Amino acid sequence: MTLFVQQLANGLALGGIYCLAAIGLTLVFGVLGFPNLAHGALYMLGAYLTFFFLTDVGLPYVVAILAAAVVLAFLGVVLERLVFHPLRNSPHTHHMIATVGVMFFLVAVVQEIWGTGFLRMESPVNGQVSVAGAQVSWQRIIIIVTAVVVLLLLTWFLKRSPHGQAIEAIEQDRTGAALVGINPSMVSMVTFAVSLALVAIAAGLVAPINLLSPGMGDSLSLTVFAIIILGGLGSLPGAIIGGFTIAIAEVMAATYISVGAGEAAIFIILIAVLAIKPTGIFGTVTQR
Amino acid sequence: MLLEVRGLGKKFGGLDAVKGVDLDVPEGQVTAIIGPNGAGKSTLFNLLAGFYRPTSGTVTFEGKDITGMKPHRTVREGIARTFQTTKLFDDATVLDNVLAGRVVRSKSNALDAVFHTPRHRRDERASKARAMEELEFVGAAHLRDRLASKLPQEAQKRVSMAQALATEPRLLLLDEPAAGTNDEETEAFGLLIRQIVARGITVCLVEHKMSMVMNLADQIVVLDHGQRIATGTPAQIKSDPLVIEAYLGANTDQAGAPA
Amino acid sequence: MTNRLNPRLLGVALIAIALLVAPFALSGQQYLLRVVTTAAIYAIAAYGLNIILGLTGQLSLAHGAFFGVGAYTVGLLTTDYDWSFWTAFLAAIVGTTVLGYVSGLIALRTQGAYFAIFTMALGFLIFIIVVRWESVTHAHSGVSGVKFPENIGPIDFTEPATMYYFVLLFLAGAAYTTHALLHSNAGRSLVAIRTSEDLAKSIGVNVAVSKQLAFTASATIAGLAGGLFASLNGFIGPDSTGIDRTFEMLLFLLIGGLGTVMGPILGSLLVAFLFEMLQDLETYRFIVLGPIIVLLVIFAPRGLIGYLNELVPARFRHRDTTPEPVASTTVSDTTKDGAL
């Protein structure tokens, strides 16, 4: 039972990370209509930037994460302007190829600056707290709390602020949104900025409990794709439910079966979902 | 009857887009389907061509049950269609576009092409000859080497008809063949449709331009809210009180009352 | 019509002649000949990707993995199991065909973005199997001592020039197959799917079957190239199956020209030389190549061949679609002669 509670806390923390990363990905898909295959690489970059701000600049942990989020948000605007805006009338295959190019570029840049080896980021918050007899580290509690706070802020942003409302409008109906005079360029930029800020926060939160490596985005990117396929590309509630489902499944499979089973669980879920319902569980019903 | 439709229905998320439609398309005639916007005309076409799977009812073509058949099979059976917003392979030439319509009648496969078998060569020759014939028929032969996307709308519509004809249909479904054309062009398309019928191909069309419908159609079917509300000759339809009500109740500007 | 003036045929002939005389021009420079042979193998794989991405318009990110499966099949069978190259090569081709067909059954239920994501996951899955299944694949130690093709009569494949011509034979086959497909109804079905799936359906293309065939064929060709690669290289490691391979093939294809007949050859050769020049900058490679990919899709999505084709005078451009049987036979025959 104690083990279960402990693993549940681990699962929830991992779920928080997955949610933040998955929402970023699903937002871009919902608004721009293509999957950002560089998302995992951006997550990796976010972790390295947090490491840089914390260790080299000496900022406090939370400020370091925010700084990384700001840098990535800015990078998002730059990418949208330089890469995806010029491609707006091209087939989606071209967008995806461009994101692959961005992915390789980012991985190569990080390898160049920080090397190909693993980096360990000292956990800025130590200690544990006892929950129902299980020891849960403060870092995991911080992750869960931050994830919830960020999700609430995001919901507020999407429902209340003009830019957020525009994003939601476009997600739901692209042509309709154009008709009511929403500037799609602006929305694309904001979407990229929000998406990359979210993935940077996810990476900053996870950095103290995981090792950093240039390849750390690869497995995350698969997991996150599995989540948004499970949840339906472009669906926010789907990303949240999918994020926690996959995280808990992964942690439990790894605890009670084997580490390999945790990894395999993601693939099995992904392939099963695609085989049974190719548009995801919560995917919008196409009129066929 | 070339095409017999009985009790055809299609639901989208619990809503009836088409409900209990009966439709008979006699061979060698022009049947027009009219109705206010959102009456289910395009859905009906999509059901006939196999793009949607009906939730109820049957479709019989030349005495054969084709209900729920996929488009590539309905085309093989002899039903061709054009789209409301003209679709062509934009980065291909006009001739290649029409050649694409020959795919379904091709008897050679990929291996024949790789090994350049006599069957492949015969097939290619016949395809090209047929494609050119159809281009001449619609009056677009001189455009054959032009890129489809570079053509004016009216020419694109002709090419898309040639493409549909190249599949050797017995029944041609035309979704608003005159949309976006001026009066003169509309008249020319009317003539072209008559020539198609003269070749022994049955035509079924959805059209908003009433002058064209009244001129061409042997039989008119009126849909409203996914249901058939009237069938008859143009003269009968013009005086049908139900039809007049449906049109007056709907947006008369867009649909155009059948006056 | 005067065939000899067609700049397209001239270009094809020039590339063909250059490839044919390469071993003589490079005699004594074994290393360079090996680079060209390797480039030719990648070009074969790029032809596979060209069928599913270039012609059919579906972005398959599992292509590098199929290449790896072919390479590992030949690698493991000729070493640990001591099969002859020829049987192992056959097994690699049959194996990747079956793998492509089976994964296509699931992959092609999906469309567009889902297809890309699914194939990416498949690619990672295959990569992870190679890395984790140490008892069979030797994981990171890789497979060394992969056999060269055994002699056929007097033909000795350990001779670099012989191996080169052996690879060239398959390259010519891949180029010719692409050419033949483009001028056939089967190929037109694929191009129709790329342009508009709805329109393709409406003219009677069986979209599901066509995609399945294209995906399977692309896997077969990738596996074949992988098998050749293992034999030529003598050693293979897990990075032969990674997504980096897929990315490189994408690059070859984009530079040469998506959906064209000569694009994969041209792209692979050019990039091979580029890689050679950037060799000292191994890690910088992707810092340069990443942005090149992005610039290419933005400014030159049709690649070099697409660009060159636009320079070709219009009177030649659509020649091979003229309904004169004589003309179209000439085109294919020339390609055949030139390529072999």
Image (tube, coloured by chain):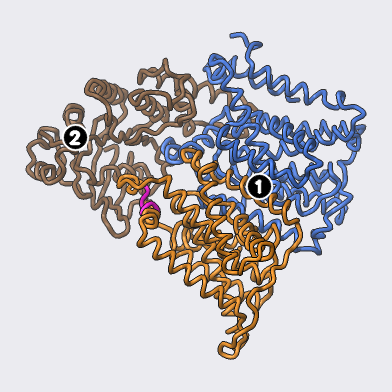
Chain colours: A orange, B brown, C blue
In the image, taking residue A260 as reference, residue C188 lies left or right, namely left
In the image, taking residue A2 as reference, residue A168 lies left or right, namely left
Q: Mark 1 = which residue?
A: A105
Residue found farthest to the top? C2
Q: Mark 2 = which residue?
A: B219
Above or below, A157 against C97 in this view is below
Q: Which mark is residue A84?
A: none
The residue range painted magenta reads A169-174
Q: Is residue B246 visible?
A: yes
Are the residues at dot 2 and dot 1 in contact (C-beta closer than 8 Å)?
A: no
Q: Position of residue A167 (x, y in %)?
A: 40, 54
User: Mark 1 is on which residue type?
Assistant: Phe
Q: Is residue A173 magenta?
A: yes
Dominant SS type (magenta): helix
Q: Which chain hosts label 2? A: B
Residue at the location (33% across, 39% down)?
A: B62
